[in-house]
Image (cartoon, rainbow, N blue to C red):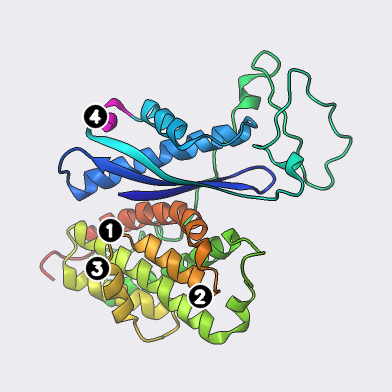
Amino acid sequence: MSRLVSTLSLDGDRISADLVVQFHRALSTATAESLADEFARAATEILGDQISQGEVPLSKEELVARVMARVTASAAKVAELEVKGLYVLGSDVNASRSTYRSRYGSSPPPPARSHGSGAITAVRPSSAALPASVLTPPPAPRIRTLWPRAVAHCRPGTPVEELGALLGPPLRDSVASAILHSFVAVDPEAADRLVLFSASNVVRDVLLEVCACFSSAAYRIFASNDIEQRVASELVRAASSVALDGETFPADAVSRYMASESPVRDLATRLAAAIDALDMAHLVQGALSPYCEAFRDDVTTVAGQLRRLVPPDR
């Protein structure tokens, strides 16, 4: 299974790693996904530590060794990691601003009088000089979606059409959030991002593409949580109708994502291609992945609520 992880330095430079997790034996899909996510989380934490401490980028071999040392023993027994590529995106003109390119010796430079420009001088402090809380980067803020509360107030027996309509605003917000996450990640020198807003056909294509990907994901989550397939389909169609203001359900695109082994990667590729920035697809995927994980967790919560609300013999 492949994962693309990405982390951002304080001054906006990004480092990404293209990972492939290989398993020594056959595993269930859920177990394999969980293990791949564990490897991805470990790699993200290591890259984040590297940036926060002002270190130069690791080699592929060093990253593999550190990830294997950080994952659980059970994960290390059944899987191994390959790093297909490391990508660094940032300014080479003013390298002294990069928090992972700048390293100083034992005597750090004096603090700047002002940080009006937003640049933060990269200094690698010693553990004796500062408390641990200063050296530890703050945790990433939790990604919030509208899914968990969408049907929380409903009672058993609520019509499926009504439940699906209530899922429309969360789906609509997820579509918007995915688009925003995607195109903020694109290098402004690599593409004209205003195309997304100035060309109406591009906007429509992007909206339908993201909605199709998330609709297929919601359907899979509902069906895997013991919701009848026909009911799951009705819920997703009703939610899509609300999310897209009555636009025709993108059935063909949904089917394509249902059949895909890497729907997030496929979505990232299509979004990057929409603004003629196909070589930025890996950055789009890196920006999408954390949101998609939050989406999956929150929709799983909704699936548990729906099991209580929808009679199993419907």
Task: Kindly identify which numbered label has been placed on residue 259.
Answer: 3
Q: Residues within 10 Å of mark 2 (few under 14, many from 20)?
A: some
- Residue 27, can we see it? yes
Q: Which residue is mark 1?
A: 303
Q: CA distance from mark 2 to mark 3?
A: 21 Å
Nearer to me, 260 or 18: 18
Q: CA distance from mark 1 to mark 2?
A: 32 Å
Relative image position of residue 218 (x, y in whole percent): 31, 64
Looking at the image, tell me whether mark 4 or mark 1 is earlier in sequence order. 4
Q: Let me know if residue 6 is in the magenta part.
A: no
Looking at the image, tell me whether mark 2 or mark 3 is earlier in sequence order. 3
Q: Is residue 11 above or below residue 47?
A: below
Q: Amino acid at mark 4?
A: Lys
Q: Which residues are magenta?
A: 72-76
Q: CA distance from mark 3 to mark 1?
A: 21 Å
The kind of secondary structure element at disc 1 is helix
Q: Is label 2 in contact with label 3 (beta carbons under 8 Å)?
A: no
Q: Is label 3 in contact with label 4 (beta carbons under 8 Å)?
A: no
Relative image position of residue 34 (x, y in whole percent): 29, 43
Q: Residues within 10 Å of mark 3 (few under 14, many from 20)?
A: few
Relative image position of residue 170 (x, y in whole percent): 43, 66
Task: Kindly identify which numbered label has been placed on residue 77.
Answer: 4
